[in-house]
Amino acid sequence: MERTFEAALVEQCAPTLAGVKPASLFRWQGEETLSLLPWARELAPFGIALRVLKTWTRTGACLIYLYRAGWLRQILAEPSNQDFLQRMGYRMDRGCGSLLEQLSQRLCRDEEFPHEIGVFLGYPLEDVEGFMEHHGQNYTCCGCWKAYGDPQAAQQRFACYRCCTAEWMERFQQGERIVQLIPA
């Protein structure tokens, strides 16, 4: 049986949907025709948005970015994150939507993966910079991403995400829909 888009959202994005992580990213390729408009309408009242950051025309796969818009705006407004993104070549004068468009363009045209995407996913800046500086080596711990700061804090965050995903998957498999699972 083929996995549905709703099942993929739960499996890949439960911490974001639950409000414990600002954003999630996953690759989708399925038989069902993907229209994000119905999902955008259902999730918008909860402050959750989604967009396609990249599409592979040859395979029909796409990179889906689900995010809590208000939380993302806060992250992108932090001076340290703005400084970092500006050093990475982002134009900072046009707001969140423009930054996501610039990220999408980098994903589509650049040969090298834009590791600054970690900022857009809510990873600590020290982890994003550490990964880039050390080329993915010499990390303090590894879970949902490679951490370069306090390993205990990172492990706690990873455990929170795992527990959230397990709980949401169980509830989803028992018949609850995503909009029933999202906290008010």
Image (cartoon, rainbow, N blue to C red):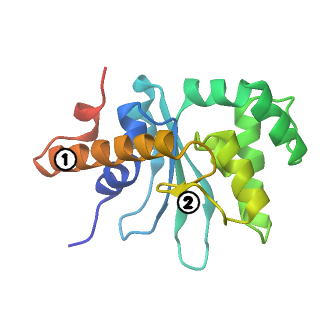
Q: Give the distance between the C-alpha atoms of the residues marked 2 and 1, in whole angstroms.
A: 23 Å
Query: Could you say where residue 103 lies in the image, as x and y percent from the top left?
Result: 73, 50
Disc assigned to residue 150: none
Residue for badge 1: 172
The structure residue drawn at horizontal position 78% and vertical position 31%, both measured from the top left corner, is 80
Residue for badge 2: 63
- The one nearer the camera, 84 or 16, is 84
The structure residue drawn at horizontal position 40% and vertical position 25%, both measured from the top left corner, is 46
Query: Could you say where residue 158 lies in the image, as x and y percent from the top left?
Result: 42, 47
Furthest residue in direction bottom, as rendered: 58
The three-letter amino acid code for the residue at tag 2 is Leu
Query: Could you say where residue 57 lies in the image, as x and y percent from the top left?
Result: 61, 73
- Between discs 2 and 1, the one toward the N terminus: 2
Furthest residue in direction left, as rendered: 174
In the rendered structure, the answer to whether residue 93 lies left or right of residue 62 reads right
Query: Could you say where residue 83 lies in the image, as x and y percent from the top left?
Result: 85, 34
The three-letter amino acid code for the residue at tag 1 is Phe
Q: Is the N terminus in the top left, top right, bottom left or bottom right quadrant?
A: bottom left
Q: Is the C terminus in the top left, top right, bottom left or bottom right quadrant?
A: top left
The crowd level at tag 1 (other Cα within 10 Å; few <14, some 14-19, many 20+) is some
The structure residue drawn at horizontal position 66% and vertical position 42%, both measured from the top left corner, is 119
